[in-house]
Amino acid sequence: MRLDKLLANMGYGTRKEVKKLLKTGIVRIDEEVSKDPKQHVDPEVNIVTVHDEPVEYREYIYLMMNKPGGVISATEDEDETVIDLLIPEDQVFEPFPVGRLDKDTEGLLVITNDGKLAHHLTSPKHHVPKTYFARVSGMVSEEDVEAFRKGVTLDDGYVTKPGELNIIEEGETSQIELTIHEGKFHQVKRMFEAVGKKVVYLQRIQMGELLLDRNLEPGEYRELTEDEVAFLQK
Ligand code: URA
């Protein structure tokens, strides 16, 4: 890859800023000063230093965000996106959200630039389970648990795969957890509509074995640990 791309990707500024940095002569490739932004480097082989500090190259970034309501899970939109919430040093990796949460949905969102992992998590072939916490207007009953277990018919005639519904609190507004193994558009909301109820708050709390980190306030994010990335690759 080009030297300027490597340095820009590693947070040393825009390509223009990197060009200026190179002119100062503080960047070395295998001990030799390089001022050429176009110079080819192989991060696996060459040692690049800035001010004698080695540049640790990484290709992928893996983030967990507690998505807040009111923000779009896309890379670009007229409205604020989850990518807008990242610091510039993370944005340089050009990450994107894995799958979509509705604008008003909160909770666990993986953001990465690893297309292979994203595909694994979203491909219908892999059936990665996703668990949601919801507050639902109306009395959620054992009948609903049974209906979700069998599969319910959505407004477009699609019959859902079995979902596991747990009632946490039954009342005028009920609290539930629901695990589904597919990801149709507005699926959780539409499943409740299919049984005559309305989701008034929705939060994703788990994807595969990855749990939402409860220390993250809505809008906050952190890097996934190596173990967490490994969970997701399973
Ligand atoms: N189901 C929904 O209805 N909305 C989401 O954001 C995710 C799942």
Image (cartoon, rainbow, N blue to C red):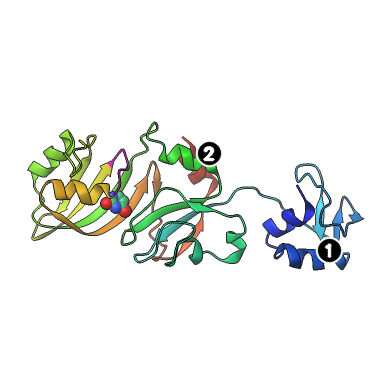
Mark 2, residue position: 116
Q: Residue at x 31, y 62 (%)?
A: 104
Across and down, in percent, residue 220 comes to: 45, 65
What span is in magenta?
A: 180-185
Under mark 1, the amino acid is: Leu
Q: Residue at x 50, y 65 (%)?
A: 84
Occupied quadrant, residue 45: top right
Whether residue 9 appears in magenta in the rendering, the answer is no
Residue at far right of view: 32
Label pair 1/2, CB-CB below 8 angstroms: no
Q: Is residue 192 visible?
A: yes
Mark 1, residue position: 22
Prevailing SS of the magenta stretch = loop
Across and down, in percent, residue 109 comes to: 42, 53
Occupied quadrant, residue 148: top left
Q: Is residue 55 visible?
A: no
Q: Residue at x 50, y 40 (%)?
A: 117
Dot 1, how many residues are within 10 Å of its Cα: few (below 14), some (14-19), or many (20+)? Answer: many
Dot 2, how many residues are within 10 Å of its Cα: few (below 14), some (14-19), or many (20+)? Answer: few
Occupied quadrant, residue 144: top left
Under mark 2, the amino acid is: Lys
Apparent side of residue 26 relative to residue 124 in the rendered image (left or right)? right
Apparent side of residue 162 relative to residue 7 in the rendered image (left or right)? left
Q: CA distance from mark 1 to mark 2?
A: 33 Å
Q: Residue at x 44, y 66 (%)?
A: 78
The tag earlier along the polypeptide, 1 or 2, is 1
| Residue 4: numbered disc | none
Q: What kind of element bears circle 2? A: helix
Q: What kind of element bears circle 1? A: helix
